[in-house]
Amino acid sequence: MKLTKYLRCVKNFPTHVSCSRRIKGEFVTALDNVFPKAYKPAAVERGVYKYWEKNGYFSAKNVEPKFSLVLPPPNVTGTLHLGHALTAAIQDALVRWHRMEGRDVLWVPGLDHAGIATQTVVERWLRQKKNVTRHEIGREQFLEEVLNWKNEKGIIIKQQLKRFGASLDWSREIFTMDSRHNDAVMEAMVRLWNTGLVYRRKSLI
């Protein structure tokens, strides 16, 4: 309202100083509302990222030339730390550079189940919060607790990566225990075994 009032004044009275005096500093106040004295990233970053996603800027189009990269999937044992931020920043700079070079870029996000590490963390959490062990609740209930843990931490990790500004194609998000990828790993191991490329024996190495 104050900015509109100032612009109306300028239109009718071209002299800037006289308008500023007429408004009695209201123009400066109006500019403070539009451009805060201190930058507030939280007010900007989420909106910008949603705009990028909405317009499909991170989606691969399957055209040449191509460049693809896989984000090393963070473990669901907890939330991201500075090391994850560094890795994401380096990869993000790389994929953005390839986009600017005109390449069709695919940067794949995902999560790693982290096996024994996640089991240990969830067992500790159960003892602290529910005073039970995995043996007491049984296999099925424990697996359900692990899945709940994965879902909770997965949401936080995804939010963190978005706050980093990581330009990942979220339509291709994967989890290492998804049936498709789990089946692929099992198939690969069977083939390696059948061709003698993997084996078991007692050895120092």
Image (cartoon, rainbow, N blue to C red):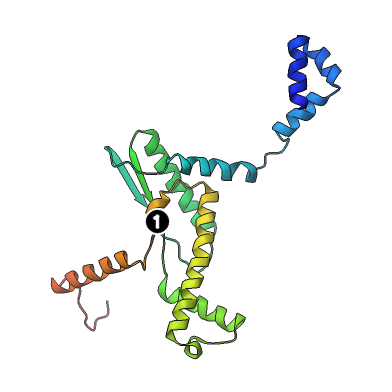
In the foreground, 166 or 61: 61
**x, y (%) of residue 49?**
52, 44
Indicate whether 158 appears above or below 144: above
Q: Residues within 10 Å of mark 1 (few under 14, many from 20)?
A: few
**x, y (%) of residue 9?**
78, 15
Q: Residue at x 48, y 41 (%)?
A: 52
Which quarter of the picture shows residue 67?
Answer: top left
Relative to residue 111, is residue 165 drawn left or right?
right
Q: Is residue 80 visible?
A: no
Disc 1 marks which residue?
A: 173
Relative to residue 177, is residue 201 drawn left or right?
left
Indicate whether 22 appears above or below 39: above
Indicate whether 22 appears above or below 98: above
Q: Is residue 125 visible?
A: yes
Indicate whether 136 appears above or below 125: below
The image quadrant where one finds the C terminus is: bottom left
In the foreground, 26 or 124: 26
Q: Residue furthest left?
A: 195
The image quadrant where one finds the N terminus is: top right
Q: Secondary structure at mark 1?
A: loop
Relative to residue 169, is residue 187 drawn left or right?
left
**x, y (%) of residue 204?**
27, 80
| Number of numbered tags placed on the structure image | 1
Q: Residue at x 56, y 81 (%)?
A: 126
Which quarter of the picture shows residue 10?
Answer: top right
The kind of residue tagged 1 is Glu
